[in-house]
Structures are given as C-alpha cells and as structure tokens.
Amino acid sequence: MLKNVYNWIDERLDITPMWRDVADHEVPEHVNPAHHFSAFVYCFGGLTFFITVIQILSGMFLSMYYVPDIINAYASVDYLQHKVAFGAIVRGMHHWGASLVIVMMFLHTLRVFFTGSYKNPREMNWVVGVLIFFVMLALGLTGYLLPWDNKGFFATKVTLEIASSAPFVGTYLKEILQGGNIIGAQTLTRFFAIHVFFLPGVLLGLLGAHFFMIRKQGISGPL
Amino acid sequence: MSDMHEKDKHPSGDKPILKKEMSRRQFLTYTLGGTGGFMVALPLIPMLRFAVDPLLQTKGEGDWVKVVEESQITTEPKEFTFSKLQVDGWYSSTPDFAAWIAKDESGKVFALSPICKHLGCTIQWAGSEVKEDPNQYHCPCHGARYTKDGKDLKVASVPLDQYDVDIKNGFVYLGTVMPNKRVK
C-alpha cells in the first residue's frame, strides 16, 4: 500500500534522486563509532541538531498556552507548568534543552577545532558555525525574558545596559531592542517576536548553509 | 562593453566618440535591478518603520512630582520614593520611583537617581557608620562606589544621573532624569 503510494508519486515527480542525494551516502570509517568508539566525538554536531529540533518542537507546543503580555505572561507559564498535563516535561525540555544545546555546540566546536576540520577548504563553514553560535546565544537571551519573572527581567536589564555601552550606536541599540524607554510590555512582545520568528528563521537558513557545505565538501579526513 | 573599449583605444578613429553608449544588456540590468530594488523596498519600508517606531516616538514631557517637604532634606542623603504616571505601550500605571535627595554645602537641594551607571542595579547610601568606604553610594552588584555628588569612584565609568529639582512652597518637586551636571 505505502509502496504503491510512493511509486505513484515517484512516477509523477521523480523524487527518488532527491532523497538519495540527501540521505544515501557513506559514512567514512574514521567518523563511525561502530568502528572506533572514540569517533563518538563526531556525533556532537548531529546531537546539537537533534536538540535544536526538540527545541523547535517543544517551543511550538509551548506557544499553545503562552501569552507574551506583561500581565499574563507569568500566569500563563505558571499554568502550563503546573496545571497542564506533561507541562513540566514540555517546558522542562525547552528549559534544559536551551542550556544543553549550548553545551553540545561547544563540544562540537572543540571537536572541529582539535581535528583541524576548520582548515582549507572548510573555513566558510567555520564562519557559518560561529554565526549559528551567536544566533543560539541570542535565542537564549530573548527566551530568558519570556516568563516575565524577576530573574529574566533583571538579566535583560543588565544585558540591555551592556548593549547601551556600545560606542556611538549603544543608546539606539538599547532602545530598539527595548521598544521604548523602559523594559516593559513592548520589550516582551519584541523579544517574543525575535525569539519565535526572526531568530529561528535566521537559524534555519544558517543550518541549511552549514549542512549544504558539509555535503558539498564531505567530512574532513582522519587525523 | 569590450566593443567600447576597442573604440576608445583607437587613436586614429574617423569620428571622435562623444558619449559612451549604453549597451542593451546594461540598460536591461539597470532597469531590472531598479525595478527589483523598488519592489523589495516597497514592502520593506513600512515594516522597518514599524519596527523602529518606539525609537522615533516623541518622548513625553516630564511632569513635576511633589516628593517631600524641603525641611526634611539634610546634608546626609536620604532616600525618598514617589509615584509617577508611566505609559508603557498600551498600559498606564503609576509605579514607585526612588531618589536620593540631599543638600550641598551651599544649601542647594539636589536629587540623584538610584540606578547604578555600571549595569543598572540599585545603589544605597552608606553613611559614616560603615567601616568600608563610608559616606559613599554603594552598589551591591559589582561594588561600584559614588561620592555624595554622584561622582563615579569605582567600577562605574559615568556619574549617577540626577533629577531635575524644583522648590515650590517649601516642597521639593522632581522632574525628568538627566545626566549628572554636578561633577565634571
């Protein structure tokens, strides 16, 4: 049945070469933990992506209950955490995953650094990776404010003070991020929009470039 | 393009070249590029203006708020709180604000903002009873210190902001917060 559906579509759209090109490729022995267990270090990048997918999915589900409004944000987070079934687990995944993704990304960066995989011809992929790192940090920062608790509020206050200390553009940068003179209703909606729409869009674009380059250039050789 | 170069180089050309003619390809590039740029800018301009609106909105004139009787102000800074209307997008509220008010040597009343200029924590006056750095403003977060006039001594690189002060009928009125003008 499923085979027939696939064939019916494949006859019309010729999709086999497409997924072959994406998924059907050899994994070199030196990056396969089944051959050399120490090759597990090559899994950190993939694990980072795996956690990123969990972040996107859990975030999508959190937005079913969350309200980005200074009066209701904390109450909505409190409700989804304590009253909704599995709320603690779904928000827990998003909360702990946010830290874990940074850890995995850091380990991945160390692996790339110590295997020298950033060298010619893969310099551009290193640069894209660093951009992904910045986007992840920005996602962490903007997400921190969203529960609208004291911790997030004052962390944001400190961060925006740091932003405002940038030469020349500092005060404008701060006001644009803040959406006004104070950290308030417009800061929360702004951070929500950035966290949920702008940065994930940028992130997916950068991840696409990251993976395209890996496929184009192949995995770097053994040490 | 290469054709034109050929003509330019020819020293004994029959007729002098008065103007460089635009090739069909270049004309089309400019036209399509211009149209494309216009069509990208058209939806983008409203969106960008929309995003930076808070930056360009006219700041509300600061209202004067009656805070305390002038007779309560001494040369030792004291903290006074007052509430003031605050418009935050679609919310209006009257939150509490604080000011450290004191008299200087000439008896002039001045008020400092309690927000540390390092990273925005809340400073406190530490009087002569404190062992370490007495008679200074202390910040609990990263140990910034300020003099009574708000001059930055440690950690912070800018003096404390001050309030606009007005004395009317024996009461201290506070206005907007502005950069410190007491210390140079």
Image: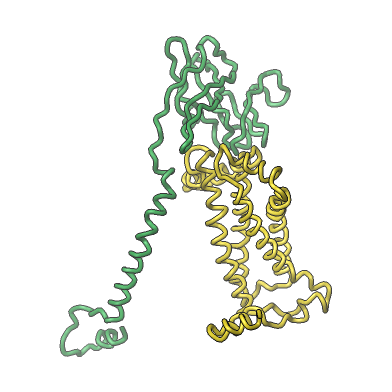
Chain colours: A yellow, B green
* Location of residue B11 with respect to A71 vertically, above or below: below
Query: Which residue, as the protein is rendered here, is positioned at the far front?
Result: A1
Identified at 69% across, 73% down, the residue is: A117
Q: Is residue A10 left or right of residue B133?
A: left
- Residue A213 percent location from the top left of the image: 60, 75
- In this view, the residue in front, A15 or B140, is A15
Query: Which residue, as the protein is rendered here, is positioned at the far left?
Result: B15
Identified at 46% across, 33% down, the residue is: B87
Q: Quadrant of the C terminus of chain A?
A: bottom right
Identified at 61% across, 40% down, the residue is: A153
- In this view, the residue in front, A214 or B125, is A214
- Residue A124 percent location from the top left of the image: 58, 71
Identified at 59% across, 18% down, the residue is: B78
- Asked if one can make out residue A21 in the rendered structure from this viewpoint, the answer is no
How many marks can you see? 0
Quarter holding residue A56: bottom right
- Residue A114 percent location from the top left of the image: 74, 69
